[in-house]
Amino acid sequence: MAACQRGCAFAIPSHSCPSWERWQSMEAAGRLLCRVSLLLLCLQPGLGRTRVVQAAPPGFMESSCLASIFWVKLDKLFLQGKFFSLEIVDPSGGTVLVDEMLAARCGYVLSEDVWGNPIFRASVLGCHVANEADRLFSLTINIKVSSSPDMRQAATYSFPMYCTYSPWAPREIVCEENYMEVSVKSDVPAISDYDSATWMSALPEVQKVQYQVWQLIFLSPSGRKKIMVSNAAKLGYSFNNTLARVFLRAPYSSNESELTVANGVSMNTVSSTSMYKQRWLLLLIDTTVSCPVDGTSFTDTAITWTLPSIIPTLVLQGDTFISKNISVGVDGKNIAHPEQNFTLEHNKTHIQITIPIGAAGGRLKSTVANGVHGIIYSINLFLEHIWADVDWHLTKYTVIKSISTPFIPRIPTVINNTIPEKRTFDVTFGSFLPDVSLVTITIGNVPLSPREAEHHGYKVYEITFPNGTKGFNLEVPFDDPTVLKEYVNRNETKYTLRVNYTLNVGPEMKPYNHPAAVECVLADIELPEAVGYCDKENLYLAVPISNLHQYWSLYIGNKLLNQHTVLSNRYLLTTNSTHLVVQVPLFAVGIIYEEVSFQRIKTRFDLALRKANTLETIEIFSVSCNFNSSAFIVCYPNGTVTVSAPMKTIPSIDMGKTKLKDSTCKPKEFNEEQAFFQFHVSTCGTSLKFEGDHIIYENEISYEKEILPAWGPPRITRDPDYRLTVLCYYPTKERLMHTAIVSNRPTNGHPPFGYGRMMVRSHVTGHRKTRQILNIISRVSKDESFLELYEPNLTIVKPSLEPIFFEVELKDEEPSVDLHLNNCWMTGSSEFNSTSQWIITMDGCENRNNESVTEFYPVSVSRRVKYPAHFKRLAVRMLVPLLGQVHLHCTVTVCSPPKGPIGNIWTCGGQCDPTRKRIDQNSEPYSGLRGYVLAGPVWIVAPEPTVD
């Protein structure tokens, strides 16, 4: 044992008690035994006492000698559930119960090691210790153990201990947990050889008298205080002397102590001088003692214990200080190679020991604080520092320190080891120290013990990690009813296992709960694959119905494919045991025209597969086909209209001579049987009207007849009448027109295709008089005079922040009508249903805001203006820098004049008076004809920099 280096505690045979001479001969054997087996109480003969023998259970007690300290450990397992007390047996007879006050004064420590085993330590200079020549020391303790608090029936185990300790340093200081002790060699002045025998014979008597005359002088912040030794004991001090030494034992934080700082470490210091006075002798001994009261710091990975190398109150002449040796021990045992577990560093100012959390010799303990799992690491250290200086020659400085870290959170982790293809959750929960046990696992709100979990088909078992910690492994099949399943992404299922662990933590078995959720995504859903085909008049898409309505829904644009959508759009929907088939006619709503030419029509029909819960588009099923058709109309989202007009007259006409309302708009291609037109709704005389929740653009294809004579009656023609009305319907909501936001836009941001109708003359003859046709144009003027206008299709460029001049004209020969601008706005797009950016007019009023200023200009009769009421002129000045192209959009109303003579004045914000008539005098009173006009684009560029 390591303690055998300086001292030893061992058992005494039962046949006799050793005398001083026999003790000397047994010392060597005692060094080899250095253990406790059978403990006997041996009483000295001649004291009138009988021999008492009480055997202790094997392993109940262990003892050792650490330098000048008795060290005893009791087995906590033997004492578990029992009561015990400790008594000191005085050499002269009788026992003394060890309590807290006695322990600090007499040099005892009763505590626990890091494993919870009771520990008793005693100084060899402590009370009731038999001292033989400051070299051999003995102490007997009684341990009383009872199963109840009543100690009268307790079993008593007597334990004599023997330690040898030599040589002593001139000064030795021990810093224990509850007391400070300093012992100093006291040299008696030399005597002459003449009377040496007399002095030597009188020395024992003098020894007896010394205690009575020793006095202590304390130096404290409050001043100097001289105390008799008898009074010092009442203050908690213990002072005594042996044949060759004087020692003082002091509690921490006494009235005479002072808190000092040595190289940044707080020290508790008692500065004292022991004085012995006779008529012929005055002996003064420095018995100052100083011990650290802190010096520990912590991180999550290590403890750092710092002590000063030089303590100024103990080393008065620092320049003579020489450090001789530093040794470290754990639990009363020296460590031969501390660098294997610790880091020991020292310099002129500090001694620093770094102990990794979990280092050998200490104990890691699990615990729970405020519902958080964590650990506490504890270790019992001692440090011995031997130094030399000119005053004391050698000083041995021993510090015994029990260190425990604060609570260190250690949040356990849940590790997902799941391999999706195995379709089983494999989860590890940890890591934990061995003092943690799994109590229950709650799965699906049902708490199960590990054994019960096995019966439910789960696997629960412990696993050990290489660092000695452990974890708990759980395996649960994906198909277990407690596992949550959710369709995610395109073809994947997210499986979620929710589990709550309940643990018993640490020696105290504190409960700890930890909820966890583990997810795994597996591509185990098969996406449907649609098949498309066509016949002469329809497009078809066939979609597998397996899992269709469980995970997905089918959409046409932004409309759910249901019975209402099918009926309202003239589709046909059929199903069988495996597929759903959608039949879509060629010119039905939802058809996308990829290419329209004189020769063919290439169309596409899209069916979107969307998530049923989020409507996220997963797949687009498409079928694309080519068709040949002699008569069709296609209305594109950007306002382009494509028409294939058939020739159905007798006699036949020259299709190359057909035209739109604007006679300059001729067919792009034609043959003997059909003519192919393509135009924008803002050109070729196209008119606009509102009907329900639709905007309707209308134009007319007609044939220029050859009339004889060309001028004047009679008029003769042999050409048939050919008129084909073209209508394009776009969905909108009239109530939103003030902000130019078109409603029900699809989620992809592109406006829907319109749908068109063609009506030949025979279908519209009876309604010719009631057809609402407005021929309105809008152009950009070069300046505010409105004398020069930009020609159509000419690039217009304006510097930023300069006004743009617009003119809107009604092309009509009816003098008694007024043109009114309802709402005008400017955007960067030519599409009517593009989102508005800048409002120009609102209900016919000039709009002034922080972005733009609008100003109307009066119109008078001139070379270009025959009817001023048919014109509206305005200037728009942007107040913020704007670059890029802009278009002007306006909705207009044309009204007949009022009955009263109020002229052509239109009041701001007014609508058509109910008394006004439409242009068609045969119709009922109406609020006015409405239309739409587009101007632009105008390119806004940065102004040219000015040159000074």
Image (spheres, helix red, strand yellow):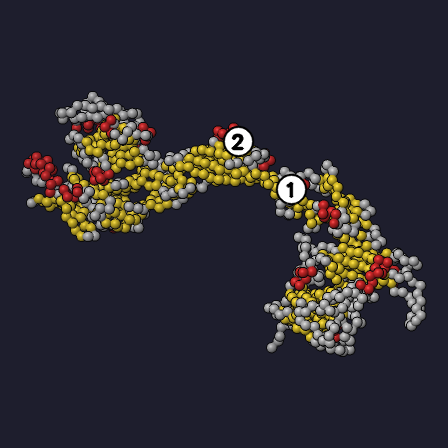
Question: Residue lying farthest top?
Answer: 15
Question: Looking at the figure, which quarter contains the N terminus?
Answer: top left
Can residue 636 be seen here?
no
Can residue 811 be seen here?
yes
Closer to viewer: mark 2 or mark 1: 1
Query: Which residue sits at x=52%, y=36%?
Result: 444
Residue 692 % position (x, y): 72, 58
Name the one closer to the observer, 262 or 440.
440
Callout 1 secondary element: helix
Residue 832 % position (x, y): 71, 61
Query: Which residue sits at x=28%, y=31%?
Result: 83
| Residue type highlighted by circle 2 | Tyr
Quickly name the residue at label 1. 551
Q: Which quarter of the picture shows residue 875? A: bottom right
Count up the numbered dots: 2
Quickly name the residue at label 2. 458
Apparent side of residue 918 relative to residue 713 in the rendered image (left or right): left
Q: Which quarter of the picture shows residue 696? A: bottom right
Query: Which residue sits at x=23%, y=35%?
Result: 98
Please tell me whether residue 777 is drawn above or below residue 615 in the rendered image.
Answer: below
| Residue type highlighted by circle 1 | Tyr
Label 2 – label 1 distance at C-alpha:
30 Å
Residue 8 % position (x, y): 25, 31
Q: Which quarter of the picture shows residue 864? A: bottom right
Residue 513 % position (x, y): 45, 38
